[in-house]
Image: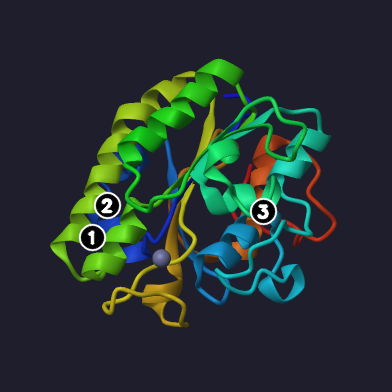
Amino acid sequence: MSNKLAFIMLDGLRYDTAVSQMGYLHHLIEMGKASRFKVKSELPSLSRPLYEVLLTGTPVFKNGITSNQTVRLSHEESLFHLTKKAGLKNATASYFWVSELYNSAPFHPVTDRIQLNTEKAIQHGIFYWEDHYPDSHLFYDANFLMDQYEPDFLYIHSMNIDNDGHLFTADSKEYRNRVIAVDILLANILPKWMEAGYQIIVTADHGMNRDGQHGGTTAADRDVPLFIITDKLKHGMYEEVIPQLQIAPLACELLNIQPSSAMQKLSFPKLK
Ligand SMILES: [Zn+2]
């Protein structure tokens, strides 16, 4: 394995549903190839604020992305900025809010849908704006970027789990079945990505409650999974609860780049 990292962010995936429904990822754990942790999300447990948390390692009161309506470029140094600064290549297949945070805001579909070879923080991006844009297509958008540009850092951001959570609540066969469907997508694509030498992170921004919402402080809102495939970690299922602010410095460690000065010092357990 190299220092390359594919960071997969499954929007709205709560911890217990990931644990009960994601058979392929747990197969990797049983085979000693992956690790699982529980992450406690930052607050508020909303999408855009937590995209910024995951990608910059800064809390909302500092980064100022306080709600989904905060439509502006980030003021922080993101994993895109840091990889570019380190001379690495980055790419993403993501919801359009990621483009608004790191490349340009507001998002214009006519010009911003596909952004390749840019001078901006995100060097190669394919962005969607419908919450029902199929995850099946998204993962192959990401695969295209991987094959075409061999990015050191590839960020993949899916939306169908969150969308079904809002439509049917977390306590529904639709939500649970969508999580199974994403696990199957991962079963189809991850063997190729691992073969290509990529380390893999799979996590979520926030969870989903029985009202079909998130934003509050309950375990349903805040507890999300973290699966890691890397040679740099002793594999297994761990009980430690990881603060979400640790994810960005963890990504820097896996990428072997300098974290930003705003990030927490990495105190991640079990790293070799
Ligand atoms: Zn949502």
Q: Residue at x 32, y 59 (%)?
A: 163
**Amino acid residing under circle 2:** Val
> What is the spatial separation of the Cα atoms under label 1 and label 2, in whole angstroms?
6 Å
**Which image quarter holds the C terminus?**
top right
Task: State the SS at label 2.
Answer: helix
**Amino acid residing under circle 1:** Tyr
Q: Is residue 141 above or below residue 225?
A: above
Q: Residue at x 56, y 54 (%)?
A: 97
- Badge 1 is on which residue? 175
Task: Tell me if label 1 and label 2 are in contact, CB under 8 Å.
Answer: yes
Asked whether the viewer can see residue 154, the reply is: no
How many neighbours does mark 1 have within 10 angstroms: few (below 14), some (14-19), or many (20 or more)? many
- Give me the disc on residue 179: 2
Q: Is residue 205 above or below residue 90?
A: below
Residue 248: percent from left, percent from top? 66, 53
Q: Is residue 206 above or below residue 136?
A: below
Q: Is residue 106 left or right of residue 160?
A: right
Q: Is residue 256 above or below residue 170?
A: above
The answer to whether mark 2 is within 8 Å of ligand 1 is no
Label 2 vs 3, first from the N-terminus? 3
Residue 111: percent from left, percent from top? 60, 37
How many neighbours does mark 2 have within 10 angstroms: few (below 14), some (14-19), or many (20 or more)? many
> What is the spatial separation of the Cα atoms under label 3 and label 1, in whole angstroms?
31 Å
User: In the picture, residue 66 is in which quadrant?
Assistant: bottom right
How many neighbours does mark 3 have within 10 angstroms: few (below 14), some (14-19), or many (20 or more)? some
- Badge 3 is on which residue? 105
